[in-house]
Image: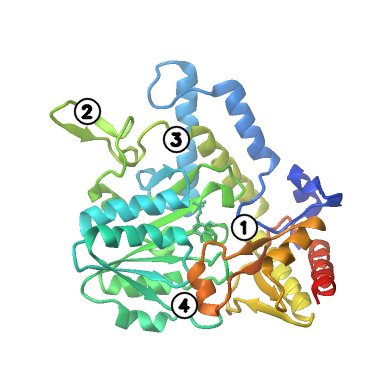
């Protein structure tokens, strides 16, 4: 291990909490991650010293606030290797970013009879906005299936893509299965048919977020899943595409001139940022990205991979455990079932032992339908988790088996 786990853990105060009289084991990182002290300090400092609305004031505070917001945009640009900051739109999160594209791209390019492709393993937020678009435009939603390991059947893509296909939306990393999808290959294939691709990076951004390398047309993620604040997210779009898309929402900041006869819109990226932006969230996100880079993304990813291997090996050494999601390329998300015990019961007992896991469909009901189950227990690990915490999970599962077995 190339980083100091004790030092890292000391930077996340919440990890010292007791839950039901036991030290917290936080294994719900795919739902939201914890925030390091530096992010909390950025938010506190902003509120205490800078707070003023951006882009509008002539006064010092507004200037500083605007500067911090635009600096955050540059930090995000560098983090995902976008060409320029005109391609970085701040939103409230991945869901808002996808809705923005589904609406604006839909308005510009999707007509009756056209097709949109999503994959079977998408989060609801990368299904429903496209369904709404298809309903609005009388277009068809087509599904790229997965196999029983939870791997996308990319070989089917050639036959699924037709002359009417306009856009394909796919996750980089499944939140319920842990599958890392071959987005680069999918994008290359889609582009060879002139089809645009939106990549949902909500989970994947922590591991590999080079938008130029993957050649994504759109890339989305949320701050709160990468150690940043809630209520802030990012839409990356290739400049040429964003330029031709109509605005999503109207309001302040997204306009250039307004009269009752006609309104003209602001330049990129402001055209897509109506209303007061979450400038404090943006600053917090920038601090989170810088912090994560200082930890070392590769080292953190490697550490999580080792932890996943350890957890998988320990869990599968128990009887009657079914792992849901056994893809060859997996990140540290472990979905499982304990015998016939309902995931909710497992989750409740684990909670009493101080262990936070998520239970249910994880906003991926089609994935559950694929496996013919209602839901799973999901332990999602982060670089601040430890083997000792995995051991506590295993002891907890043994306890669940004893109680319900
Ligand atoms: N996509 C994936 C793969 C997710 O895991 C999530 C959240 O769990 C989302 C999209 C939606 O993210 P948010 O709720 O932050 O908008």
Query: CA gap, disc 3 to disc 2?
Result: 22 Å
Sequence-first tag of 1 and 4: 4
Sequence-first tag of 3 and 4: 3
| Residue appearing at x 50%, y 19% in the figure | 61
Query: CA gap, disc 2 to disc 4?
Result: 47 Å
Mark 3 touches mark 4? (CB < 8 Å):
no
Mark 1 touches mark 4? (CB < 8 Å):
no
Vertical side of 169 occupied by 95: above or below: above
Is residue 156 visible in the rendered image? The answer is yes
What quarter of the picture does the N terminus occupy? bottom right
Q: Nearer the viewer, residue 306 or 334?
A: 334
Sequence-first tag of 2 and 1: 2
Report whether 90 appears left or right of 249.
Answer: right
Q: Nearer the viewer, residue 178 or 187?
A: 178
Vertical side of 114 occupied by 53: above or below: above
Sequence-first tag of 2 and 4: 4
Please tell me the numbered disc located at residue 297. Answer: 1
Report whether 348 appears left or right of 259.
Answer: right
Name the image quarter holding residue 377: bottom right
x, y (%) of residue 7? 79, 48
Mark 4 is surrounded, within 10 Å at the Cα level, by few (under 14), some (14 to 19) or many (20 or more) other residues, namely: many
Q: Secondary structure at mark 4?
A: loop
Q: According to the image, label 2 marks what residue?
A: 257
Please tell me the numbered disc located at residue 70. Answer: 3
Name the image quarter holding residue 268: top left
Query: CA gap, disc 3 to disc 4?
Result: 38 Å
């Amino acid at each position: 291990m190339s980083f100091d786990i004790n030092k890292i853990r000391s930077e996340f105060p919440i990890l010292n909490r007791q839950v039901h009289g036991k030290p917290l084991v936080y294994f719900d990182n795919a739902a939201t991650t914890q925030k390091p002290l530096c992010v909390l300090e950025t938010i506190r400092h902003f509120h205490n010293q800078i707070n003023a609305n951006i882009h509008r004031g002539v006064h010092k505070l507004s200037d500083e606030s605007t500067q911090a917001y635009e600096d955050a945009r540059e930090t995000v640009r560098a983090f995902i290797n976008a060409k320029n900051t005109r391609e970085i739109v701040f939103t409230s999160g991945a869901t808002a970013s996808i809705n923005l594209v589904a609406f604006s791209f839909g308005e510009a390019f999707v007509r009756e009879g056209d097709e949109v492709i999503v994959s079977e393993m998408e989060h609801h937020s990368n299904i429903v906005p496209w369904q709404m678009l298809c309903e609005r435009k009388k277009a068809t939603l087509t599904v790229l299936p997965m196999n029983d390991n939870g791997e996308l059947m990319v070989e089917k893509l050639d036959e699924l893509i037709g002359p009417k296909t306009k856009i394909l939306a796919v996750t980089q990393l499944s939140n319920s299965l842990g599958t890392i999808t071959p987005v680069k290959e999918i994008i290359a294939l889609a582009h060879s048919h002139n089809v645009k691709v939106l990549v949902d990076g909500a989970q994947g951004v922590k591991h590999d977020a080079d938008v130029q390398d993957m050649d994504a047309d759109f890339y989305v993620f949320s701050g709160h899943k990468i150690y940043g604040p809630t209520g802030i997210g990012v839409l990356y779009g290739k400049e040429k595409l964003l330029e031709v898309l109509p605005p999503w929402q109207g309001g302040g900041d997204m306009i250039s001139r307004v009269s009752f006869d006609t309104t003209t819109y602001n330049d990129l990226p402001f055209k897509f940022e109506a209303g007061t932006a979450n400038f404090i969230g943006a600053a917090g996100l920038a601090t989170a990205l810088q912090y994560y880079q200082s930890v070392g993304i590769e080292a953190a990813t490697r550490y999580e991979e080792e932890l996943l291997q350890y957890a998988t090996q320990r869990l599968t050494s128990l009887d009657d455990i079914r792992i849901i999601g056994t893809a060859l390329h997996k990140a540290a998300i472990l979905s499982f079932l304990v015998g016939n015990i309902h995931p909710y019961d497992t989750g409740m007992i684990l909670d009493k032992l101080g262990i936070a896991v998520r239970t249910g469909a994880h906003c991926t009901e089609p994935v559950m339908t694929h496996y013919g189950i209602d839901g799973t227990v999901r332990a999602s690990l982060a670089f601040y988790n430890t083997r000792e915490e995995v051991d506590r999970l295993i002891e907890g599962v043994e306890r669940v088996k004893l109680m319900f077995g």
